[in-house]
Image: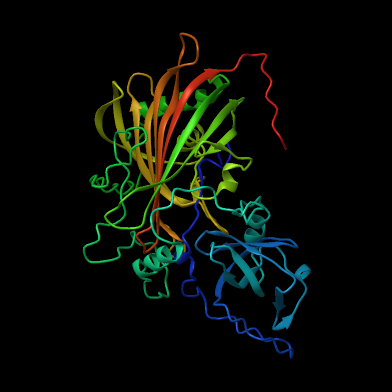
Amino acid sequence: MSRWGALVLTFLVGLPVAAQQPRAPQVPPLGIPRGGKQTKPSAEPTITISGILRRLSDKELVLEAQDSRILTFTRTQKTTFYKNSAEAKPSEFTPGDWLFVEATQDEEGFLHAVAVAWQKAGTPEERARAAQPVEPSVQRSDFDEPPPVLRRAGSRAQEKTEEAAARREPEPRVVREAEPPARIGPDDPGPPPLRRGAPARSGQPADAEAKLPEPLPEPPAAPPREDPLIEKARRAVAAYNEKLPNYICRQMTTRYQSRSRPVNWKAVDVISADVVYENGREQYRNIEVNGKRTDKTLEQLGGAWSKGEYGSVLADLFSPATAAEFLLRKNETIAGVDAAVYVFFVEQPNSHWSVHVPSQVIRPAYGGSVWIDRKNGRVMRIEMQAQRLPLDFPLDTVEVSVDYQYVRLGDATEHLLPVHAEMLTCQRATGFCSRNAADFRNYRRFEGEATIKYEQ
């Protein structure tokens, strides 16, 4: 764990209704004996998931699945618990125990526990891990109304029909290993890539016909001796937050969606917010959706969003605790700077990059490329792609890129700050993809006597 904390970059992805139907169960149905009490079976389809209990409260159950996902189930008075083939009290379940959870999944992707069965006691190591703080995915908030959107022509019923027609579920597999993003037809070009090596123009969709990047090389079996430029970059990143003054800027994010392949991006909405960076902490204030003020937070708006562009993503990548492996690929000029381009890879156990969808969160293995200024070791651009996403995770593509440039904050001193960021997510086995394009504008410094108050 790096000293900057585990939450480096987070997505909350609003999923289309058609993509939320439960997949094949991960384990056979529970077949829980009802202790002589006949229970009317539910008419809703259910999924059954096995994993380690991380947290249990009156309102939710948090489970760590075998594929490293953290799943949050809503618990109600109707949720039943069983242990050793008999009905049990929730107090008999201890974090670290292995459980089967039978659950339903609503149209928004949230999971609701129907029955919970004790499987076996956890090992001392599993109990110790379960005692650590857990990062559950957000559950439904009090703000369930969708934000204003610029809908395309056609009714929601037509959209559901199109989504269902585009979806082709893969056959159930006993062993669920990572696979490349699914294709929905023999001529399907696959999910759209983010533009590599240069930011898209402000307010314009990325080129849908951009070529896919070269495959990332396999990480070497034995890491080579530390590259001097990588070591210089580590020192530069370590000093980044310490030397960065307090500032404020305006972030403008245009969100796009495409429901076809090849992609045909349609603008959904524009979200703007003041980003207040004070003492290493980011706060988002004065949020507007399509030019109208809202009291909702970014998390409550739904859809896709990201955080961490202001340094934490770099701090974690270059932290020794992440153990990223770097390999020099080429030299390139970016934003007028002579840069070295490295590819990198981070194994899943060392990942602190969180990807959220309703009721689920995962920290995937990831790889990508990073552009480093040869003169001073500063990072000018970073691209990250999630790797080996579990087949039961609703997304098969998660990518992000951030461009940095030198910016003056009202004085002669230049500071390296993000100027553009893009994020791409695609639904597994569908043509539904979301893309965010964010620009960071009007940077200005906070005066030392300024006081910022945050609402609790």
- What residue do we see at 78% from left, 73% from top? 89
Using residue 206 as the reference point, say whether residue 62 is left or right of it. right
State the residue in front, 70 or 255: 255
- What residue do we see at 66% from left, 17% from top? 450
Please tell me whether residue 100 is drawn above or below residue 151 in the rendered image.
below
Using residue 187 as the reference point, say whether residue 454 is left or right of it. right
Please tell me whether residue 198 is drawn above or below residue 76 in the rendered image.
above
- What residue do we see at 35% from left, 42% from top? 368
Give the percent coordinates (x, y) of residue 414. 44, 15
Report the coloring of the rendering: rainbow
Q: Quadrant of residue 378?
A: top left
State the residue in front, 373 or 141: 141
State the residue in front, 39 or 88: 39
Q: Quadrant of residue 254?
A: top left
- Residue farthest toward the top in the current orientation of the protein: 412
Tell me the quadrant of the picture where the N terminus can be found: top right
Give the percent coordinates (x, y) of residue 260. 31, 58
